[in-house]
Amino acid sequence: MKNSLINIALMTAVAAFGQDSAKQSLAKSPRHHEWVNVKSGDRTVSAFVVYPEVKTKATAVVVIHEIFGMTEWVQMLADELAEAGYIAIAPDLLSGMGVTDPNAVGKAIRDLPPDQITADLNAVADYVAKLPAANGKVAVAGFCWGGTQSFRFATNRPSLAAAFVFYGSGPESPDAIAAIKAPVYGFYAGNDARIGATVPKTQELMKAAGKTYDIVTYEGAGHGFMRAGDAPPPAADAEQKVRDAYAANKKARDEAWKRWKDLLKKV
């Protein structure tokens, strides 16, 4: 029952947080945004870059989008990272795939070849590390599908400074785990049995390999709480269970943001 209520809240929040809200937030931002084309083998990856307003060279964060693709929310989150003092680059991993139907985005993302994802992320990480405003350090963060991919990217790029996994699963292969050099930080929802059930095994594998895997589970929150916690509050006449679910997601979102920024300061 609890998971059902959280799912109701999540769907409501996602629907409420439309493109216009994110666009308005981005339009008000004083930071420099730009779209760049990054070569990845024979592919060209479109990526959204936001620069912080700082005096010194900054650490960069590659932001991997959700199963919903390159949405305005992802761009807004990149802007918030820049506000915190980091260069944020969010690649559209469906670049050049010709997917225009929003209903087809999820399937197209699930069908992306793993080697292509790795090549695209490496190309983007190489690009941002070499920017004149960058200090050469690159971390990765991902959400939902992107959370799983951020963990996976840590197995393929030993030079990463850190990997931040938001409600994504970890690799199942001990060999893949052994290749990880960066510390991995997990952000999980208490009401997310699908992903939560994978965490103990990941902890076991990471511990056996002597890897850093520091997690926090936000009780009462549902899968996707970073996006759901950004949504406008439900209407005053909404059911109490919907208001409670929103409050839990909002609390998790705020606490996760604070933890994330505190960890980034240590990179």
Image: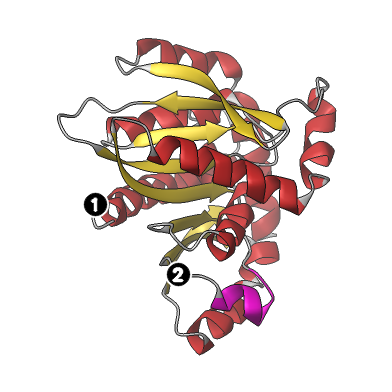
Q: Residue at x 39, y 48 (%)?
A: 138
How busy is the neighbourhood of tag 1: few (under 14 within 10 Å), some, or many (20 plus)?
few
Q: Which residues are magenta?
A: 171-178
Task: Give the numbered dot on residue 236.
Answer: none
Q: Residue at x 59, y 79 (%)?
A: 200
The residue nearer to you, when weighing 106 against 225, is 106
Q: Gap between marks 2 and 1, in whole Å?
A: 19 Å
Q: Which residue is mark 2?
A: 181
Could you tell me the amino acid type at mark 1? Lys
The residue nearer to you, when weighing 249 against 50, is 50
Q: Which residue is mark 1?
A: 265
Q: Is residue 174 magenta?
A: yes
Residue at the far left in the pictured view: 55
The residue nearer to you, when weighing 8 against 113, is 113
> Helix or strand or loop: what does disc 2 sit on?
loop
Q: Earlier in the sequence, mark 2 or mark 1?
A: 2
Indicate which label's residue lies in the foreground, 2 or 1.
Answer: 2
Could you tell me the amino acid type at mark 2? Lys
